[in-house]
Image (spheres, rainbow, N blue to C red):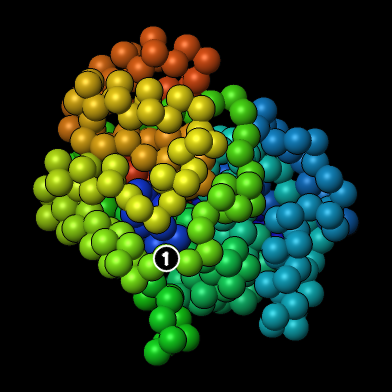
Amino acid sequence: MNGFTISVPASSANIGPGFDSAGMALNRYLTLHVQESSEWMFEHRSKHLPPAEAAKDHFIYQMAERMASEFEAVLPPCKVIVESEIPLARGMGSSASAVVAGIELANQVCRLELNQEQKLEWATKFEGHPDNVAPALLGGLIITAETKQTDKVEYFQTSNLNMDLVLYIPDFELKTETARKVLPETFSRTDATAASGIGNVMIAGLISGNYELAGRMMEADLFHEPYRASLIQNYDEIRQAAKEMGAYGTVISGAGPTMISFAPKGTGESIVKGMQAVLPDYSVELMEVDRNGLRVEKLQLCK
């Protein structure tokens, strides 16, 4: 087996009222350089990653092993060098990227020949919901749904977002489990109807190009942002300052603590400059939508 590289983008999920259903791939990447070895080894080369664990304890290996076992396949030993531009526990889909990478690792070394639909189904099963794994796998903005009528993830995908994206990444973590604990277990029919309507109009605005409308709906979310706002430092200040600088809307990225602004095309650089002055302890970055999703390069299958 000659070496190959797996690349998986970061993602920003939830997107206001798109709770557990709307996600977008970003141009930051988790990259695996894989080569044949006499035993399983992982090496980390990133400031965003802790020291590599023993192979059998490594999350990506565990995902690959789980995928292989589903097809009664055996993982041949590999050395995997892991590079990452995705900070952990920041609301940028680091877990989902690792899940997709693990599935693809097994797909390649075990020759499973999985198609995109199968990868999405398994990634959703492993991750628990599709809003991060779908864009990490497929790229673009993806709206997903799981229904009782089908046994697959239904989705709509588009890459035609003519906007700038500005992320505000703090130097502290927020675990998804913590962010989920503050959410209500149930909603009244009246509240659920209002929240669903806001989400529907936001998606219509994004797809039709009415970004001002979409931005207003993002910031009107009733599903999760009102409950998580107290967990996000500078939440109100970031939204207000970004709005004053021209952003359509600003929301929590994933479960936080990172936040993301959707802004008119061409205004992103000025917003980055202005917001960096407001948030000197943050990494304020202009990003783009990744349109490709998972990529595998320089692949040669086992003999």
Q: Residue furthest bottom?
A: 149
Q: Where the C terminus falls, by quadrant?
A: bottom right
Residue 55 vs residue 161, the one in the foreground: 161
On the rendered structure, is 278 left or right of 195?
right
Instruction: Name the residue type under label 1.
Output: Phe
Whole-percent x, y for residue 264 in the image: 18, 32
Whole-percent x, y for residue 163 in the image: 22, 38
On the rendered structure, is 124 left or right of 264?
right
Q: Where the N terminus falls, by quadrant?
A: bottom right
Q: Give the residue displayed 38% in from the left and 68% down from the top.
A: 188
Q: Give the residue displayed 38% in from the left and 28% down from the top.
A: 236
On the rendered structure, is 107 left or right of 223?
right
Q: Give the residue displayed 59% in from the left and 63% down from the top.
A: 127
Residue 29 vs residue 189, the one in the foreground: 189
Decide: few, some or many residues near mark 1? Use Cα within 10 Å; few <14, some 14-19, many ≥20. few
- Residue holding disc 1: 187
Q: Give the residue displayed 52% in from the left and 75% down from the top.
A: 121
Q: Is residue 104 visible?
A: no
Residue 107 occupies quadrant: bottom right
Residue 237 occupies quadrant: top left
**Relative to 200, does residue 152 appear above or below in the rendering?**
below
Residue 126 vs residue 16, the one in the foreground: 16
On the rendered structure, is 97 left or right of 35?
left
Whole-percent x, y for residue 19 in the image: 41, 57
Under circle 1, the secondary element is loop
